[in-house]
Each structure stands twice: as structure tokens, then as C-alpha cells.
């Protein structure tokens, strides 16, 4: 059931993203929505997918088992009250900061003032979704502790379906086909409605499991204090990791010519905007595309490896621990190389199949594909990063990854601020900076793990294996690039979407097979190991 719910969620999310891009294109309106939607997304990642589950679930479970359900319900009521007050304070703070940007960061023209006003209006409407999505995450954690998983897994489907309704039904009621700045409010309204509907969907399930809901602000509950103590270090660590993309979004917005002239004057300093309108939307679309294989393959591999690494670390069996870490790391790098190679050479067909309809034209496809190309080059590092993180987590070490992130965050920011001024790169600068800093994170992390465990991890064998993987990926990518015109000719059908689907899927399957075949010919053991794991999973 969880697998089915997750699959439905991913499919409806893909449809939502396709319709958003097709309806609004890479426009000022889509940029404004993406900027505003980053705030609830940020807190969903911080609480819903991170610190809340990591801190609340074990404490709540022990409260149910050791102190009884009434004590657990009191803990829930006090946690809910504390979260509500904290999030309302954060919402007010964000509104004040954005108002400060409105008043103190100059806008050159009326068009730029209008785009900024649209962004602020959308943010004001959707900020309360921060509160509902975090409460949904809290209720989902309670249900998971009580053995109910499917309802919580279905809540993202509610958001996706209502946003689709906002695009297709509500938006057109608010404005004509040319009034996209009005239609987009239909999507914003659907987001708020989705948050309320998610809560309404979970409340009967909670009652069915006997959960007594309440609301009481009390900081003296020992269970709540324990949750806070566990959440703080996780929030700090994840906050630094999430801060990079958050800063990228703000830089992308501030340095884009949002529907106005390309010249600007900030506090007496005249300059030309390095980014055009649609830069934020192009970046957001490319990020969603590269994160799909990352989530499906690499993160799943990392999650599966953590229990084994933790058991070996508890036994202080560092020889076996290092062998397991390196084997998992090599698999992650191979997955990143193969999928990244396909993203670099086949980026345009992928984007064209998914997005290039209606207002999303060929020029928009090129812009997104350019950003996707650089993310593809760094996908091996993004995949490997998750394995290195699990290496530290198996040692119960959260501090070291946090310090590495703090060290490299200014580097990431500096690279982005420098490269956005290069006309050939523009918004691709953010993908390049992420690639560089992720690769540095992997190398620094492995070096520190070596010191902690006194085991050699960055070995000649690992480097030679990674080199052969790179050669195999490059070979498969070059072969696919050479065969590209022939594949496009075979897929030249009158049904546009079907032809593009055949071209894209056919190219990805063929290119991936060529990469894996090249890896086997180069003597890499990982392709055979993946096949054996696949057969074992089927059995």
C-alpha cells in the first residue's frame, strides 16, 4: 500500500509540474509562484521529512509503551501547541522580511514592482500552508507510530490533485488566457485548500485509532523537552544543507530582470541584470528532474546501507565497515554516472517530452536542458554524498557533516555569484556551484572518515574504479549522441507526445544499457552485482 501510494504521489506530482510549465512557461508569473512556494517547501523538508520524524517518533513511541496512551496524548497536545506558536511567529517574521525587501531593495520599473507585488501576494496567501503541512507531518508521525502508514502516504496526492484543479479549473475562472498573473492565484488558493483538506483527511483516521487531540502550551512536559533536545541538532544540520538551495532561489530572483529593463541601479551602483525572467522557473524544473533519479536510486541505496553500517560500527569492526562503505559508495557512483550521463546527452528530449507544449516553447526547453546538463555532470557526487552522510550517521556523528556544510556554503554562494554574470551560463551557475561543492563534500567527508576509523577509503582501487565508471558513462553518452538522429527519425510520429515519449524512453534505455555494457567490458564488478541484487529481490 505504501508503495502504491508513493507511486501515485510521484505520478500526480509529475502531472502537476507538467501542467504548471505548459500553462505558465518560463515567465515572471511562474518565477513568482516558485519563489513563494519555496517557503512551505522549506519547512516541509525541515519538519515533514527530517527533524520532526527523527525526534518525535522515538519519544512518542516510548511514551505510548512506557507511560500509556494518555501521557502520549498529552505530549501530542503540547507538541502541537508549541509547533503552532513557533510557526505562526516564523510566518510573521518572513512577512516582515519580505516587506523590508519591498521597501528597501529598489525596483527600476513599474513592471518589476508589479512582479515583486505578485510574489509578495502569492507568498502571503501560501505561507499558512507552512503551518498545515507541519501539522500534517506531526499527525502522520503519530499514525506511523500506531502502525498506520497508507493515509499519511496519500496526503501528498491531495496536494497534487488540488493544484491540478487550481491550474485547470480555478485559475481560468479568475482570469483570461492572457491574464496569467490572475490565473496563478487559483493555484495558490488550491495550495491552502489542500492543506486544510489534508488535515480533514487525517483527523478521522486519528480518531479511529483512539487518538485524543488537544492543544495546551506547556514547555515543562519532559517528553516535549526531549523532542526539542533531539530536534535542535538535526534542524541545524539539515538547515545548513537546505540553506544552499534557499539562497540560490533568492539570488536567482533578486538578480533577474523580472519583466523590466536589463539595467538596474541599487544604492547608487549601476549594473546589468545577469539573469532573464524565467531563470528561477528553469532552475526549479531542472532540479525536480535531477532529484527524481537521486530519490529513487541513490537515497534508497543509502537508506538500505545505514543499518548494516551502524551494526558494524557498533561492533567496531572497521575493516568490514570500510569494505561495506566502499562497495555501497561505488554502486552509488555508478548509478550517478549512468543516470548523469543520460541527463547530459539526452536532456533536451527529456524536457521536450515533459514540458514543451502550449506556452513552454523550444527556447524554454533549451534553457532547462542547459541547467539539467550541469546537474547531470554532478549527479555522481550528489549520489555519493548520501552514502558518505550515512557513514557519519553510522558513527552517531551529526556534527562533522554540519561543519563540512558550513565550510562549503560560502564557497557555493561565491561560485554562484561569480558565474551568473557569464552570459553562456546564467542560471546554470547554480547547478555548477552545487556540483563543485558536492564533489568537495564527498572528498572531504571520505578523508575525515578515514581519520576517524583508521581505514583507507580513498584508495587507488576506488579511484581507478571511478575512472572506469566515468569512461563507461562517457562512452554510453557519446554512443547515444551519435545515434540520436536515428532514434529521433524512428520516433517521428504524427502523435507529438507519443513520438517524443518513444524518442526519450528509447534513448534512455539504450544509453543506460550501453553504459552498463561498457562498464562490464572495462572489468567493473558493479553491473554484475546490481543484476544479482535484482534477481535476489525478484526471488
Image: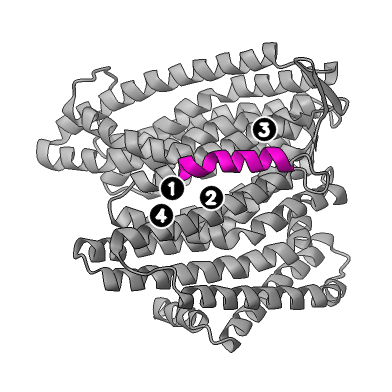
Quadrant position of residue 2: bottom left
Left of 61 or right of it: where is 472?
right
How busy is the neighbourhood of tag 2: few (under 14 within 10 Å), some, or many (20 plus)? many
Name the quadrant of the N terminus: bottom left
User: Tag 2 or tag 1, which sits nearer the N-term?
Assistant: 2
Left of 282 or right of it: where is 328?
left
- Identified at 53% across, 50% down, the residue is 9
Q: Write down the residue under mark 1.
A: 153
Camera-nearest residue between 40 and 450 = 450
How busy is the neighbourhood of tag 3: few (under 14 within 10 Å), some, or many (20 plus)? some
Residues at marks 1 and 4, CA–CA distance in whole angstroms: 25 Å
Residues at marks 4 and 3, CA–CA distance in whole angstroms: 27 Å
Q: Write down the residue under mark 2.
A: 9
Q: Write down the residue under mark 3.
A: 251
Q: Nearer the viewer, mark 4 or mark 2?
A: 4
Q: Write down the residue under mark 4.
A: 389
Amino acid at each position: 500500500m505504501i508503495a502504491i501510494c508513493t507511486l501515485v504521489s510521484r505520478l500526480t506530482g509529475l502531472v502537476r509540474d507538467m501542467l504548471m510549465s505548459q500553462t505558465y512557461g518560463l515567465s515572471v508569473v511562474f518565477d513568482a509562484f516558485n519563489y513563494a512556494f519555496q517557503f512551505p517547501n522549506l519547512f516541509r523538508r525541515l519538519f515533514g521529512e527530517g527533524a520532526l520524524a527523527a525526534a518525535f517518533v522515538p519519544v512518542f513511541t516510548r511514551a505510548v509503551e512506557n507511560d500509556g496512551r494518555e501521557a502520549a496524548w498529552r505530549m501530542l497536545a503540547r507538541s502541537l501547541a508549541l509547533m503552532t506558536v513557533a510557526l505562526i511567529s516564523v510566518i510573521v517574521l518572513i512577512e516582515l522580511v519580505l516587506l523590508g525587501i519591498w521597501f528597501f531593495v529598489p525596483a527600476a520599473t513599474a513592471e518589476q514592482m508589479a512582479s515583486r507585488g505578485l510574489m509578495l501576494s502569492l507568498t502571503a496567501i501560501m505561507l499558512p500552508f507552512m503551518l498545515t503541512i507541519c501539522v500534517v507531518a506531526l499527525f502522520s508521525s503519530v499514525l506511523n507510530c500506531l502502525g498506520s502508514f497508507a493515509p499519511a502516504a496519500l496526503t501528498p496526492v491531495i496536494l497534487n490533485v488540488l493544484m491540478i484543479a487550481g491550474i485547470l479549473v480555478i485559475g481560468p475562472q479568475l482570469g483570461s488566457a492572457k491574464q496569467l498573473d490572475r490565473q496563478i492565484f487559483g493555484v495558490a488558493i488550491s495550495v491552502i485548500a489542500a492543506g486544510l483538506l489534508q488535515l480533514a483527511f487525517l483527523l478521522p483516521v486519528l480518531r479511529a485509532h483512539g487518538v485524543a487531540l488537544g492543544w495546551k502550551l506547556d514547555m515543562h512536559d519532559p517528553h516535549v523537552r526531549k523532542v526539542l533536545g533531539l530536534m535542535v541538532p538535526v534542524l541545524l544540520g539539515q538547515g545548513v544543507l537546505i540553506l544552499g538551495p534557499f539562497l540560490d532561489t533568492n539570488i536567482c530572483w533578486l538578480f533577474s530582470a523580472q519583466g523590466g529593463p536589463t539595467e538596474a541601479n541599487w544604492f547608487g551602483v549601476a549594473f546589468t541584470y545577469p539573469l532573464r525572467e524565467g531563470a528561477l522557473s528553469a532552475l526549479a524544473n531542472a532540479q525536480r528532474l535531477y532529484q527524481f533519479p537521486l530519490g529513487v536510486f541513490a537515497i534508497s541505496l543509502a537508506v538500505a546501507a545505514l543499518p548494516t553500517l551502524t551494526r558494524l560500527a557498533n561492533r567496531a569492526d572497521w575493516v568490514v565497515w570500510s569494505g561495506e562503505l566502499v562497495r555501497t559508495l561505488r554502486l552509488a557512483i555508478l548509478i550517478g554516472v549512468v543516470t548523469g550521463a543520460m541527463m547530459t546527452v539526452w536532456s533536451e528530449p527529456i524536457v521536450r517530452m515533459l514540458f514543451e507544449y502550449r506556452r513552454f516553447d523550444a527556447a524554454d526547453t533549451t534553457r532547462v536542458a542547459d541547467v539539467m546538463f550541469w546537474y547531470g555532470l554532478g549527479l555522481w557526487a550528489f549520489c555519493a554524498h548520501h552514502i558518505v552522510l550515512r557513514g557519519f550517521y553510522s558513527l552517531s556523528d551529526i556534527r562533522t557533516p554540519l561543519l563540512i556544510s558550513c565550510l562549503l556554503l560560502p564557497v557555493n554562494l561565491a561560485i554562484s555569484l561569480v558565474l551568473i554574470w557569464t552570459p553562456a551560463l546564467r542560471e546554470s551557475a547554480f547547478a555548477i556551484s552545487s556540483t563543485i561543492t558536492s564533489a568537495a563534500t564527498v572528498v572531504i567527508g571520505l578523508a575525515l572518515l578515514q581519520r576517524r576509523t583508521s581505514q583507507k577509503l580513498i584508495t587507488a582501487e576506488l579511484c581507478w574504479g571511478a575512472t572506469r565508471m566515468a569512461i563507461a558513462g562517457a562512452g554510453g553518452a557519446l554512443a547515444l549522441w551519435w545515434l540520436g538522429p536515428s532514434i529521433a527519425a524512428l520516433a517521428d510520429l504524427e502523435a507529438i507526445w507519443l513520438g517524443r515519449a518513444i524518442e526519450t524512453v528509447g534513448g534512455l534505455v539504450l544509453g543506460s544499457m550501453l553504459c552498463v555494457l561498457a562498464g562490464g567490458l572495462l572489468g567493473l564488478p558493479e553491473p554484475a552485482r546490481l543484476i544479482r541484487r535484482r534477481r535476489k529481490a525478484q526471488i
